[in-house]
Amino acid sequence: METERTLGIGRIRTTDEVHEKQYSLPERHLLEARINNLPATRTMYKVFTLITLGMVLDGFDVYLAGAYSAV
């Protein structure tokens, strides 16, 4: 079933259908084992570093905004 809602100035079309692949229990265990055995690569460390730097920068931004509003 398809419905249409208005939100602000745009329209959002939603459906009640969910298209998800359901894995069986053995398949889930196999996927979990494969994910748990993935090696740590340089790309993973780069992503981790970028996320960490982004969180530090966001915290510093909030700190500056708080210091500015207190003046």
Image (spheres, helix red, strand yellow):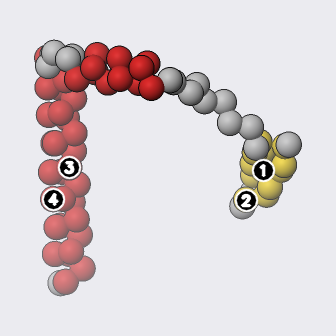
Q: Which residue is mark 2?
A: 7
**CB under 8 Å between callouts 1 and 2?**
yes
Q: Which mark is residue 66?
A: none
66 relative to 40, above or below: below
Residue 18 as seen in the image, left or right of residue 36: right
The one of 18 and 31 positioned closer to us in this rendering: 31
The one of 16 and 34 positioned closer to us in this rendering: 34
24 relative to 54, above or below: above
First along the sequence among labels 3 and 2: 2
User: Hey, which quadrant is residue 60 in on the image?
Assistant: bottom left
Q: Quadrant where the C terminus lies?
A: bottom left
Q: Which mark is residue 11?
A: 1
Please tell me whether mark 4 or mark 3 is closer to you in this view: 3
> Can residue 43 be seen at all in this image of the molecule?
no
Q: Residues within 10 Å of mark 2 (few under 14, many from 20)?
A: few
Q: CA distance from mark 1 to mark 4?
A: 37 Å
Q: Which residue is mark 3?
A: 55
Picture coordinates of residue 4 (x, y %)? 83, 50
Residue 31 as seen in the image, left or right of residue 44: right
First along the sequence among labels 1 and 4: 1
Please tell me whether mark 4 or mark 2 is closer to you in this view: 2
First along the sequence among labels 4 and 3: 3
Q: Quadrant where the N terminus lies?
A: top right
Dot 4 lies on which element? helix
Q: Which residue is mark 4?
A: 60
First along the sequence among labels 4 and 2: 2
Q: CA distance from mark 1 to mark 3?
A: 34 Å
User: Hey, which quadrant is residue 36 in on the image?
Assistant: top left
